[in-house]
Amino acid sequence: MISMRQRTSFVPDVMPHLSAGRHRNPRRGACFMEFASYLAGERWSDHPACTDRTLAALARGVNDLVSDGRRDELVEHVPRAVGLRGGDEVALVVAVRAAVTALPIASLERQRVLAAGILSLCALLERRGVPSHDLREEAHRALDEVPDAARWARTHIASIPSRRARIDGISCELVVATAVVGAARACVDDPDTHLIRMLTAAVDDVERLLRPASPATTPLEARIPAPAAL
């Protein structure tokens, strides 16, 4: 069975101790998305069908790069990720959130990539009418904090022929990967806090998008589905 640990301020008794990487079975541990697959009653996997693929990619990245001492702060958010699936708009929102979080602290090279991603993704969100005004406003404020990267990104986007300026799920996952690594390797005192905020804020954003009537503060006990038998 999944290894348990004593109650802490973040991990109830019924929760597992998360660890980095992929695990063959629950006896070897669990990452964020493997535990999500368990709660969803799916086959044990770090790529379950219960969660949007871009959000799942973000969860795997944060799970693997956050420090061992802070990883269990993610556990309470695992049940929230179960069932968060939608159309392409979910991938766009997740990618923008990840990029916005990492942009101020990433290296200049990654800032340029993230700034270009933010500009392209926000434009697409607006064109498609996806409810994301607050996120887009936050994104533009983040761009204002890195004017050199933003200027480079606008020039770069303008140089790409419109027929080649295609954004898909893979593009969103590349933005997410750049954001996660950028935050993890940033020259800041506490990269873990940025990584954790990146994932939890993305879950908040997707919940607001898909479940506008359900507040993100639903008690943890009410969100945990009955686990499948192992």
Image (cartoon, rainbow, N blue to C red):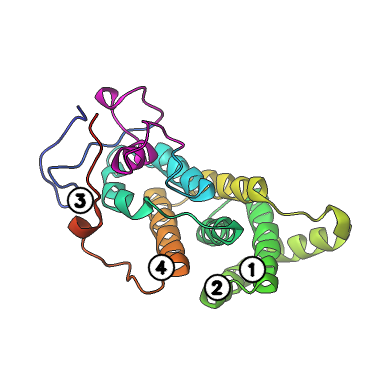
Q: Are marks 2 and 1 in contact (CB under 8 Å)?
A: yes
Disc sitting over residue 211 in the figure: 4
First along the sequence among labels 3 and 2: 3
Measured in 3D between alpha carbons, the distance from the residue under mark 4 to the one under mark 2, in whole angstroms, is 14 Å
Q: Which residues are magenta?
A: 21-47
Magenta stretch contains residue 28 = yes
Q: Which residue is mark 1?
A: 125
Magenta stretch contains residue 65 = no
Position of the C terminus by quadrant: top left
Do we see residue 199 in this rendering? yes
Disc sitting over residue 10 in the figure: 3
* Residue 130 figure quarter: bottom right
First along the sequence among labels 2 and 1: 1
The crowd level at tag 4 (other Cα within 10 Å; few <14, some 14-19, many 20+) is: few
Residue 6 spot, x, y in % from top left = 10, 39
Residue 14 spot, x, y in % from top left = 15, 42
Number of residue marks: 4
